[in-house]
Amino acid sequence: MPRRPLFIFFALLFACASGAYSQPPLERRPAKPTPKAKEEITKIEPKTREDILKVLELPAASSKEGLLARLLNTITINTASGPIIPLPVADSSKDLGPSFGFMPIIGIRGKNTSELKAVIAPSITYNANLRTTLTYRHYIFPDEKRYFILRASKSERVERELMVYYYTPQLFSTKMRLSVEAKHWVTGKPSFYGFGINSKRGDKANYALNIAGEEFILDIPVLKHLFINFNHSYFAKQIDDGPMNSGQMQKTFPLLYSEAAGRRFFHTNRFSLVYDDTDHPFLPKIGTYASASALYSNKKLGSDYEYRTYAFQAKNYYNYKEEGRFVTAAHWLLQFQRGETPPFYAMPQLGESTGLRMTGDGRFTDHGKFVFTIEERITLSHTPFMKFISETEIAPFLDVGTVFTKPTAFRARNLKYAPGISARLVIRPQLVATIDFAYGSEGTNAIIRIGYPF
């Protein structure tokens, strides 16, 4: 995943707990009796899904402000088109080290409405390995579900990006869901340590991954909440020297570097059967997502490698007492490859952005992997929507994962465990800003990102 520098309120993220949940207590109401329940009119029926989701709606602007809202009021610059919040940037990477800088968050409201229609977030940051980085981010929300991202970035050393992304859950006014992405991306963040769960941290080798191409994903409804998913992608990939001054892959793994340094083409197609009754595509609070998929790369269709990747995964979001303040989120994934072995960067990996937050990207690589994560997402407070930071969360979590050569080689003793805690700012209608702290046998790690881990 690309590095996405993000703002942190440092002490504010945790200090906001002192103003926890500034809204009045929620009243529990019995659901309207159905015809079958009329003879049991005295029995309180459980809440319906719609009742639960009402609790999750944004608070009115007149609701009592907590500490976070008061601090945002202090630094916010109000304009006719929307608020501007000038914020410091602090980004952490176990691979590249800390980054610091400045990023104004600019909210743009629709005409004659207070609804947020776009967020612009340019930034300038400095990292000892990448030097100065300029980034432009533009998030566009045509409505509550559709979503545009425009992003461009350039570092003094190695990294650069140009990306366009679009998502709609109602293609041509139907229930078909479509996402489209085109990008040219060079990242110097990942490292390679060798193959298998027993690879050594001392063999860490940095490299730059260059990717250019396109991808689209189409969900076609079959039954209620059941979809057939088609994912097409065509990318050219290659590696080069990374930004680190030592530990380059060209010296540590010369044979693997030689194979991966040449430009390789990957035309892949994936078919999935998907069940999805979650309430939101990016900020889920309730429901289940499950899928079974098969991806194939075929030389006859333009790929340089012939292989198949199978994956089975499930995500569940459970509301404790159906109130929305405590959401138990769980995710598990089983993935493995068959056929010709592609370059290491195209194989299943387990690391910072791929299921194991205590370590850097690319820490473990093999033909298959297993990941299980559970989080307790606790809403601390709500902030008036005019500041577009609508909720604060804290989430203790546990990551569990391993890699293996084939499914029958899976061994429970090889599992890596990584507990931690996250602090989050939910920026409705589509974004969440996250800072994760994780620790375990690989040491500690701090990660700043946009989006939930699942």
Image (tube, grey):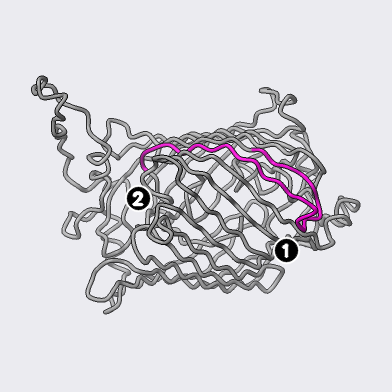
- Badges 1 and 2: C-beta atoms under 8 Å apart? no
Tag 1 secondary structure: strand
- Tell me: 257 left or right of 87: right
Residue 72 drawn at (x, y percent):
31, 63
Residue 173 drawn at (x, y percent):
38, 59
Q: Is residue 116 above or below residue 169?
A: below
Q: Residue at x 11, y 20 (%)?
A: 40
Q: Amino acid at mark 2?
A: Thr
Q: Nearer the viewer, residue 334 or 107?
A: 334
Q: Residue at x 52, y 53 (%)?
A: 218
Tag 2 secondary structure: strand
* Badge 2: residue crowd in 10 Å (few <14, some 14–19, many ≥20): many
In this figure, which residue is indicated by the disc labeled 2? Answer: 392
Q: Is residue 430 above or below residue 394?
A: below
Q: Earlier in the sequence, mark 1 or mark 2?
A: 1
Residue 355 drawn at (x, y percent):
59, 41
* Badge 1: residue crowd in 10 Å (few <14, some 14–19, many ≥20): many
Quarter that holds the N terminus? bottom right
Q: Is residue 299 magenta?
A: yes
Q: Is residue 398 above or below residue 112?
A: above
Q: Residue at x 31, y 45 (%)?
A: 380
Q: Is residue 73 magenta?
A: no
Q: In which quarter of the view is residue 316 placed?
A: top left
Mark 1 or 2, which is nearer the eye?
Answer: 1
Q: Nearer the viewer, residue 339 or 346?
A: 339
The magenta stretch spans which residues? 285-310
The residue lying furthest to the bottom in this view is: 80
In this figure, which residue is indicated by the disc labeled 1? Answer: 210
Residue 210 drawn at (x, y percent):
72, 63
Q: Which mark is residue 416?
A: none
Q: Is residue 190 above or below residue 25?
A: below
Q: Residue at x 86, y 51 (%)?
A: 256
